[in-house]
Amino acid sequence: MKVALINSRKDVAGCNIRHHIEQCIGESSPRGAERSYEFFEVSGRLIHAEGVDDGIDADLVIFLSRHSSVNPVPVLTVHVTGNFGPAELGGSPRTLAPAAPAMMQATLRA
């Protein structure tokens, strides 16, 4: 499985997440030796990176980014990209990307 990880240069948290993932991959072979990982970086904000994955040959695309909440407690979240309703912050209205529930669950459990 080819996994693409995308972060924005403008997002300090996304850059930090990328750095730590690169260290984890470099220190030990991740489970499933059949997986390969490739990192990509965009200069603008990810919410404005329409079609950034169009030229990427991967089975799974993961966006590494910061999220904020009304409850300022550090937490790891995973979710599908897109919009349930109006596209107030970018993207297309009422459009969600295909989900990878097994990978999402494995990430949270790990």
Image: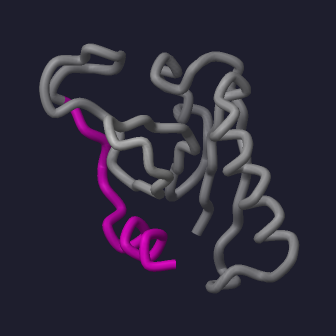
Q: Nearer the viewer, residue 47 or 59?
A: 47
Q: Quadrant of residue 42?
A: top right
Q: How many marks?
A: 0
Placement of the N terminus among the 4 image quadrants: bottom right
The residue segment tinted magenta is 95-110
Q: Is residue 37 left or right of residue 63?
A: right
Residue 44 horizontal/vertical position (percent): 63, 16
With 98 as the anchor, is 64 left or right in this view?
Answer: right
Residue with the most extreme right position: 27
x 25%, y 38%: residue: 96
In the rendered image, the vertical position of residue 12 relative to residue 76, given as above or below: above
Is 106 placed left or right of 10 in the picture? left
Is residue 84 within the magenta segment?
Answer: no
Task: State whether residue 78 is above or below residue 8.
Answer: below
Task: Give how far across and how far down residue 97 sits, in percent.
Answer: 31, 42
Q: How is the image coloured?
A: one colour
Quick check: 70 left or right of 19? left
Query: In percent of the image, x 15 and y 33: which residue is there?
Result: 84
* Closer-to-camera residue (24/101): 24
Q: Is residue 5 above or below residue 32?
A: above
Name the spot of residue 61 as percent of width and height, x first: 52, 49
Where is 82 relative to 100, above or below?
A: above
In the rendered image, residue 101 lying in the magenta stretch gets the answer yes
Q: In the figure, residue 41 lies in which quadrant?
A: top right
